[in-house]
Amino acid sequence: MLRIGSMNMLLHGVENPDIRYRDSLAETEVAAAGNDAERYSLVLANPPFAGSLDYESTAKDLQRVVKTKKTELLFLALFLRLLQTGGRAAVIVPDGVLFGSSKAHRSLRRILVEEQKLDAVVSMPSGVFKPYAGVSTAILLFTKTNSGSTDDVWFYDMQADGYSLDDKRTPQPENSDLADILTRWRDHETERKRARTDQSFLVPRAEMADNDYDLSVNRYTESDHDAVEYDPPPVIMRRLAALARD
């Protein structure tokens, strides 16, 4: 696996990748990796989903951040440990992280919003990781501050990434939101004026707090539809009775 990872990095232009064989979440690795704490200014990660560890084997400092066995939550706690103050992260997570109702899910989302600076949530369509997995995912972008400073969070509901969303993943460069995401990400002042019916918008911190720090874009999206008026029930019943007589 290490050789495959090194080859992949070389193919992407990283000539001297530093890839190590170890369990980053294990208690036995804490001493060896202790000098990695607050070492990095940037973390880009797609950690394993849906894993589960024993409390006894998991690093105690991560358990102090969030008491859980779920690897997708523990990895977020790990990235907070690795980042310097002011460091930034972009992490792909399964959708369950955004709206999970367990105490650990809510606690970690509260930490990102209230104790750190959650910058953005980019929701991705299910299928972007096919044929390997069909789970719906999102990208969390956050900055480690240890002092809060989340005023509002930018949400983007990605519909396409330039490939078909089936197992073939056929290139469809004309059907991609990626360029729009980058353009809108750089212009938050314009994004503040966008409505909740748009593909992207800002949500204030207080509103997220009122919703148990739910980070799913559907929680805050508003539907734009025309009101439909129906006849009152007595009129409908008379029509049905007339049809029955006929």
Image: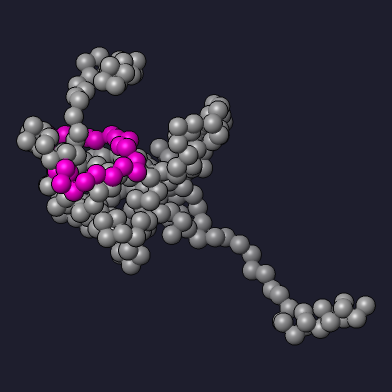
Q: How is the image coloured?
A: one colour
Residue 221, placed above or below residue 20:
below
Q: Kindly identify the residue that appears in the image at 45 percent across and 42 percent down.
A: 135
- Can the viewer see residue 161? yes
Which quarter of the rendered picture does the N terminus lie within? top left
Count of picture labels: 0
Residue 221 left/right relative to 209 = right
Q: Is residue 40 magenta?
A: yes
Q: Kindly identify the residue that appears in the image at 32 percent across and 37 percent down.
A: 48
| Quarter of the figure with residue 209 | bottom left
213 or 201: nearer the viewer: 213
Which quarter of the rendered picture does the C terminus lie within? bottom right
> The magenta stretch spans which residues?
36-59
| Quarter of the figure with residue 149 | bottom left
Instruction: Give how far across and how far down residue 108 sits, in percent.
Output: 25, 54
193 or 214: nearer the viewer: 214
Residue 60 left/right relative to 98 = left
Instruction: Give how far across and how far down residue 241 sits, in percent.
Output: 84, 82
Residue 77, placed above or below residue 178:
below
Residue 59 left/right relative to 90 = left
Instruction: Give how far across and how far down residue 6 sits, in percent.
Output: 27, 18
Q: Kindly identify the residue that appears in the image at 57 percent across and 60 percent down.
A: 224
Instruction: Give how far across and how far down residue 80 sits, in percent.
Output: 19, 44
Q: Is residue 145 magenta?
A: no
Residue 164, placed above or below residue 152:
above
- Can the viewer see residue 177? no
Q: Residue furthest right?
A: 246
Q: Kindly identify the residue that appears in the image at 12 percent across and 35 percent down.
A: 29
